[in-house]
Image (cartoon, rainbow, N blue to C red):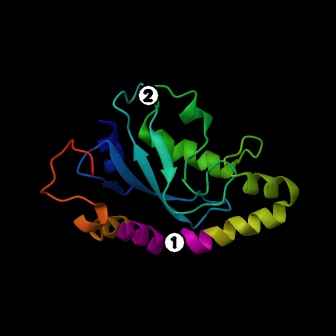
Amino acid sequence: MDVMKLMMSDYNVETINDGLNEFNVKFHGPKESLYEGGVWKIRVELPDAYPFKSPSIGFVNKIFHPNVDELSGSVCLDVINQSWSPMFDLLNIFEVFLPQLLLYPNPSDPLNGDAASLMMKDRKQYDQKVKEYCERYAKQEDIMKSTADNETDDDDITDEETGSSDDEIAGHADP
């Protein structure tokens, strides 16, 4: 399967909920780019119809890029969102599509309007902000932090905080 192929490659793949439909992949910024030296955790969700339907791809830790939503991490990439083909696989995403996205941002089709605007108006300041984000949010420890945050967030919620308990009967509305 495609996921196994990715796992057997040089990529660090961390499954979520012990399944192969949701996982995180450690992704390094491409060499000779503003993102070189950065490390991101990329969340991948495979739909039931994969490979006939494209996967959902998103950056978990922050990145400053015109085609990546700063809050959600969603990626705007035609080859994934519109022209996906079952001939593509997960390795294509990490070896070709994402590196190309980081090397050649498209400010005319932005998900991050601030990044797009800055890139078009002041390329030097844009480059500086990209590097600043890499320093601040794209280090190995940032990936580890986001994993720990995700694991502890669920554990911190008690039954009282969620308003539920084992005594309640499923399907009944709260009074």
Numbered disc in front, either 2 or 1: 2
Identify which residue is drawn at 32% across, 49% down: 7
Q: In the image, residue 53 lies at what x, y percent?
A: 44, 28
Query: Quick one: 99 or 127, which is closer to the camera?
Result: 127
Q: Is residue 48 magenta?
A: no
Secondary structure found at label 1: loop
Q: In the image, residue 93 lies at what x, y percent?
A: 50, 42
Quadrant location, the N terminus? top left
How far is mark 2 from mark 1, CA to CA? 32 Å
Identify which residue is drawn at 54% across, 35% down: 80
How many other residues sit within 10 Å of disc 2, few (<14), some (14-19) or many (≥20)? some
Q: In the image, residue 2 lies at what x, y percent?
A: 34, 37
Name the residue type under label 2.
Answer: Lys
Which residue is labeled 1 in the image? 139
Which residue is labeled 2 in the image? 53
Q: Residue lying at the far left in this picture: please name it.
A: 167
Say if 43 sits above or below 126 in the image.
above
